[in-house]
Image (spheres, grey):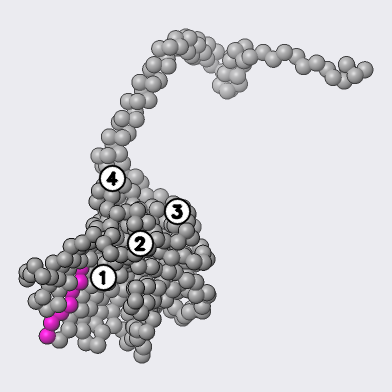
Amino acid sequence: MEASDANVRAKSGTEEQKHLTASDEAITFMSSIEPAELQRCVFSESLAVMSENGSDLGTFSVSVEFSRRAQQPCVLLHAQSQGVIDGCPCGTTVTAYISVDLEVLEEDYHEYVELEGHSVDKKCYLVQHDGQMVISRVTAVGQEETKESVCYPMNALRGLVTEGSSLLMMRLMALRKKLPKNMSFVSLDQRLQTSHTTFNELGLKQLEVGGEVLEGFGVQRTVHCGEDIPVAWQCYLLDDGHLVSRMQVGSPVTMKLVQLPPKTEKNFQKIPLAWEEDLQMVSEFSDRKEELKADHTSYLRQHPEIRALLSDFLLSLLLRKPNDVFQFAREYFLPFAPRRSPQPNLNAQAQ
């Protein structure tokens, strides 16, 4: 399947476009995230995709784990939904690398739906490169394919939120149970132009999961698409960040948690660190070991009295063989302690 020249479009993100920025509240929220909060977001979850009458239509899953990209520590998020709606197979997959400051480093988005007689396939790829966010999109409708690409300087996308990063961000919001007002982020619309995405608090709601009634914290994400009608999603999450329900406003399809996640033990089982198998960690350990060895050798060379002092102490210790080694050491080194001048007796002076 080839794309004709008329269907290939490349442009700069600054061409004929109003410069949009994220609000101060949004930037502050992103920069305030602590490592401990990100650690609590590292888990996998799965929800059922259901119709209004409760029919099972498919599954929706999200996993978050720590990773590295170009030697930079980051968070790897993978989300996937798949099912059959109105007799048409469809699905969405998102894989995103997100920095610890919630900055999108790379994201791959794929959406498809198989209609009668033809299929629709959309792929969008974002990646940071040389201070710019390079975005490419390929849309295939049947045999016709359209390619688009756009570049934005990273300073123009400060406070960017995407499909992938929004899922991580809502986990963090649920952990805090509070959303700052006037949080407006930068996002990209269907035309790959910058727009705004807002998050609003919906309050608390009683939800039934697996026969239990739980309290969910509600968050609404709204994508403002210029002159088009805004698109909104409403999500309710538990206080540990697990998603209970997710739905697009106006859609008959809802994603629901049907089984409670296992409770996390307070005392985590320690997993042995096989650092000997990590070439980078072995190299860093060897370098640090040699650095400390050279530093210690240099210090001992500059102070030869240390060897003589320790040698005399060990010789005296082995000759006397005391039962209380600590008391012997205290008495042995007591003469080396700096002598303090006697303090004047204030009471005697007063008399």
Q: Read off the residue under disc 4.
A: 71
Q: Earlier in the sequence, mark 1 or mark 3?
A: 3
Name the mark nearer the viewer: 4 or 3. 3
Given residues 339 and 133, the one toward you in this image is: 133
Q: Is residue 59 above or below residue 150?
A: below
The structure residue drawn at horizontal position 34% and vertical position 30%, both measured from the top left corner, is 288
Q: Earlier in the sequence, mark 2 or mark 3?
A: 2
Q: Secondary structure at mark 4?
A: loop
Name the mark nearer the viewer: 2 or 3. 2
- Gap between marks 2 and 4, in whole Å? 32 Å
Magenta stretch: dominant secondary structure: strand
The structure residue drawn at horizontal position 24% and vertical position 88%, both measured from the top left corner, is 86
User: Label 2 is placed on what type of residue?
Assistant: His
Name the mark nearer the viewer: 4 or 1. 1
Q: Read off the residue under disc 1.
A: 191
194 relative position to 309: left or right: left
The image shows residue 213 at horizontal and vertical percentages of 50, 79
Q: Are marks 2 and 3 in contact (CB under 8 Å)?
A: no
